[in-house]
Image: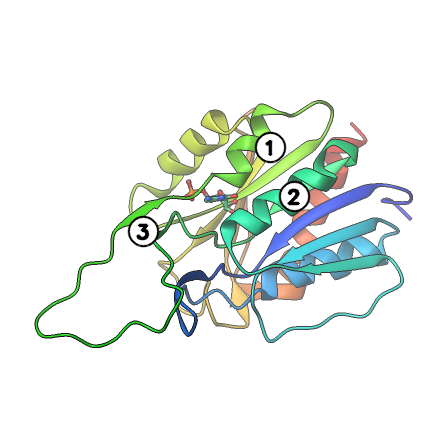
Amino acid sequence: LPLRDKKVLITAGPTHEAIDPVRYLGNRSSGTMGFELAKTAANKGAQVVLVSGPTNLDVVHDRIQLVRVTSAQEMYEICHKYYADMDIAISAAAVADYRPKEVHAEKMKKKEGDLVIELERNPDILLSMGQQKKNQFLVGFALETENEMENAKDKLERKNLDAIVLNSLKDDGAGFGSGTNKVSFIDKNLEIKTFALKTKPEVASDIWNEIIARIHA
Ligand code: C5P
């Protein structure tokens, strides 16, 4: 098994940023890509910590420890609890960049006129993992709508990654909420491999093959 005894951290899903006890800011990530990456790794022998934001997904596997979180801040804390001890980390979560500055203790009442909610920045979990990287092989995702390749390469360098997976949104059936995805895998030497539109389990397998080829190189 190519990943036997490797410790792998994977983030998945969206984050929910509370506004009050019943409302939040979120996004349409289903978590599927991260869960598929976790299953594939476990089937290849890895010991996986899967840190997931709110999703409808579940996974039961001897070698997957599923840690459910809600907010970006919680995801950040759980990731750093495990990261130092990991061999590989993949950030597939759609982490909210901002959170409401104030979380109301009671359900907000409707008032006359418009409402402004002030937002503050969340930590960039992947950036922080890049900054604290020792020997981990660190992989990020990039979801861009313009200048996709340039932005992905920029992210790869800025976040000190070993590889980045560019999710193409330009192709029908790719990305959020769909069962399929079309990706390019770009490593830190800027070697690029572009894959066809495939199901997410197939994409997970392609991504792991690229990672495995590089960690044993
Ligand atoms: O910079 P951008 O958000 O486009 O980068 C996307 C990558 O960074 C993804 O791998 C995502 O999981 C990760 N990320 C993160 N924490 C954030 C924002 C993004 O880990 N606050």
Select label 3 or label 2 by which is in front. Answer: 2
Q: Measuring 58% from the left and 28% from the top, which residue is drawn there?
A: 130
Q: Measuring 54% from the left and 40% from the top, which residue is drawn there?
A: 125
Q: Secondary structure at mark 2?
A: helix
| Disc assigned to residue 145 | 3
Q: Secondary structure at mark 1?
A: helix
Counting from the top left corner in percent of width and height, residue 180 is at 53, 68
**Sequence-first tag of 1 and 3:** 1
Dot 3: within a 10 Å radius of its alpha carbon, few (fewer than 14), some, or many (20 or more) residues? few
Q: Is residue 206 left or right of residue 172?
A: right
- Work out whether residue 46 or residue 65 is closer to the camera in this orientation and state it: 65
Counting from the top left corner in percent of width and height, residue 96 is at 42, 52
Select label 1 or label 2 by which is in front. Answer: 2
Q: Which residue is mark 1?
A: 129
**Sequence-first tag of 1 and 2:** 2
Q: Secondary structure at mark 3?
A: loop
Counting from the top left corner in percent of width and height, residue 175 is at 46, 63
Residues at marks 3 and 2, CA–CA distance in whole angstroms: 28 Å
Three-letter code, disc 2? Cys
Say which quarter of the image contains residue 128. top right
Counting from the top left corner in percent of width and height, residue 122 is at 42, 43
Query: CB under 8 Å between callouts 1 and 2?
Result: yes
Q: Is residue 188 visible?
A: no
Check the image and report above or below for 63 versus 150.
Answer: below
Three-letter code, disc 1? Met
Q: Is residue 130 visible?
A: yes
Disc 1 under 8 Å from ligand 1? The reply is yes
Q: Which residue is mark 2?
A: 79
